[in-house]
Image (cartoon, grey):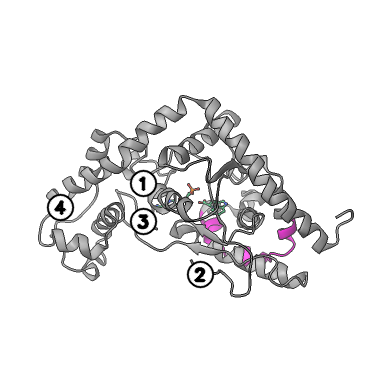
Amino acid sequence: MSNPSADYNGPERVFSGVQPTGALHLGNYLGALKKFVALQESHDCIFCVVDLHAITIPQDPKTLADNTRKITAAFLAAGLDPKRAILFVQSAVKAHSELAWIFNCSARMGWLERMTQFKDKAGKDKERASVGLFDYPVLQAADILAYKATHVPVGEDQKQHLELSRDIAERFNRDYNAPRFFPLPEPLIKGPGARIMSLKDGTKKMSKSDASDLSRINLEDDADTIARKIKKARTDPEPIPHSPGELKGRDGAANLVGIYAALAEVSDQDVLDEYAGQGFGIFKSALTELLVQAITPIGEELTRVNADPAHIDAVLKDGAERANAIAAPIIDEVRQTIGFWGA
Ligand code: AMP
Ligand code: TRP
């Protein structure tokens, strides 16, 4: 991977986060987890369950604690190795909150006002949204830069937040006359799977919060459930086309072709070469088979890992210590750079 900012010369480091707000789905897997698992082979990786982000909207304490363990279990079940990658919970490492405050003073209101995720989540009643929801992307920048992470694997929906992280890093470096202090983190978004859409509506992204369970494949779904959901997935009466250009305007069809390509690790064109001219029947059976192969072993592993909360807690405790050991000296440097007493 290329160096994220030509003149930053620190080590390459990967960071990403997932919110503990419900069961993970195929979009999370293809957009994030699958990439995490590949990256742990080549890079120093830090993966975080972002509970501070979760409380930007109200959470029930017991459910938050359960979901935090569940996301950790999903990290493990998907194949992350806690000896290699650091797996931990955001609120267990104080650097995140401290750096977020400092970055609040570098970020500009105008930058945050442009964030589409805030507009979507706050909806019409912006006045009643929490200040935390507005500030969400600043905390995200702090997550990444507390480790001077250089590369951030995420789905397409996080692109704008990553651009903001780069703006904040650049602004801090300039404001404190500390050139090259923070890297400008590079998003790793490309590739099939970056934007998986709802199975019911190919214009909406697959999401944990969609009211219809038929809109998504959950990592916990068994083979029959997957088969049923794919059978019901929205397509159209036209046959499968010969070129990706012809999928324009056929959102449901394009989504299924994209999912197939991401799972088989081939291009959309390769998928079309195999199925062009046919209806969706045979294609949907083949897609179901691929999904069952990829997803059900993770679901089974999830059940096994979830049954051992003491193991999950041990992983998180060790992860928090290792994460803190990286972040604490960086925060000390930040304190010195700003001129805080005692630093
Ligand atoms: P979240 O569950 O919102 O914390 O998202 C966790 C990760 O999954 C982030 O990197 C998201 O960009 C990614 N992600 C969420 N939904 C999708 C989707 N429908 N397609 C691809 N990636 C997604
Ligand atoms: N905002 C991300 C999401 O909703 C989660 C997240 C929080 C994150 N902090 C991060 C992702 C840092 C990458 C890096 O999906």
Q: CA distance from mark 3 to mark 2?
A: 22 Å
Report which residue position mark 1 lands on: 26
Tell me: 219 left or right of 62: left
Which quadrant of the figure has residue 185? bottom right
> Looking at the image, is mark 4 or mark 3 earlier in the sequence?
3
> Looking at the image, is mark 2 or mark 4 earlier in the sequence?
2
User: What residue span does the magenta drawing correspond to?
Assistant: 101-120
> Looking at the image, is mark 3 or mark 1 earlier in the sequence?
1
Q: Is residue 240 visible?
A: no
Front residue (pair 40, 151)? 40
Report which residue position mark 4 lands on: 280
The disc placed on residue 2 is: 2
- Secondary structure found at label 4: helix
**Residue depth check, mark 1 versus mark 4: number of the one nearer the observer:** 1
Q: CA distance from mark 3 to mark 1?
A: 9 Å
- Secondary structure found at label 1: helix
Where's residue 186, x and y in %? 53, 65
Q: Residue furthest right?
A: 341
Report which residue position mark 3 lands on: 193
- Secondary structure found at label 3: loop
Amino acid tagged 2? Ser
Front residue (pair 175, 210)? 175
- Residue 119: within the magenta? yes
Q: Judge: label 3 CB < 8 Å from ligand 1.
A: yes
- Secondary structure found at label 2: loop
Q: CA distance from mark 2 to mark 4?
A: 40 Å
Q: Judge: label 2 CB < 8 Å from ligand 2.
A: no
**Residue depth check, mark 1 versus mark 2: number of the one nearer the observer:** 2
The disc placed on residue 83 is: none
